[in-house]
Image (tube, rainbow, N blue to C red):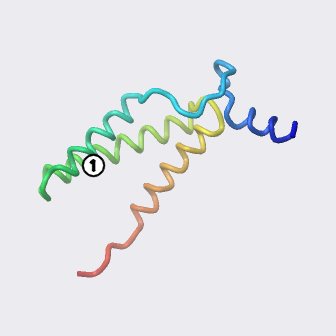
Amino acid sequence: MSRNKDRMNWMFRSRETGRITIGQSANLEQKIFSGATLVGVLLPPSKVRTGVGVVAVLALLVWGADEIARGVNPFRRILGAVALGGLVVLAFRRSPPR
């Protein structure tokens, strides 16, 4: 059991505060991503919707890179890497033929 506890401490313990940190308050990039995604869902297909989608992707890109560089624990850094990995997969995914 002690070994599992050590792993949990290593993965989730904040290197800044020493507290267990899984979630945090949304930062500016997360708020921009959430707002742009919500607006994009509500808009009909158009150039404006495409622009809002670009803003959402850029905000997620900045957030993921920031988490990798400055995440408070390994879990947060992995979370940022997963977000960036998802963007890479989406970027190289082929769209279905019409």
| Outermost residue to the top | 17
- Name the residue at 81% across, 35% down: 6
- Vertical comparison of 16 with 72: above or below: above
- Name the residue at 33% across, 40% down: 33
> Which residue is identified by label 1?
54
Instruction: State the quadrant of the N terminus.
Output: top right
- All told, the count of numbered labels is 1
**Where, by quadrant of the figure, is residue 72 drawn?**
top right
Residue 4 placement (x, y as % from top left): 81, 41
Seen from the viewer's position, the closer of residues 55 and 41 is 41
Does residue 80 appear to the left or right of 12 in the view shown?
A: left
Q: Which amino acid lies under the numbered mark 1 shown in the image of this protein? A: Val
Does residue 38 appear to the left or right of 71 in the view shown?
A: left
- Vertical comparison of 85 with 21: above or below: below
For mark 1, does the 10 Å Cα neighbourhood hold few (<14), some (14 to 19), or many (20 or more) residues?
some
Residue 58 placement (x, y as % from top left): 34, 44
Seen from the viewer's position, the closer of residues 94 and 7 is 7
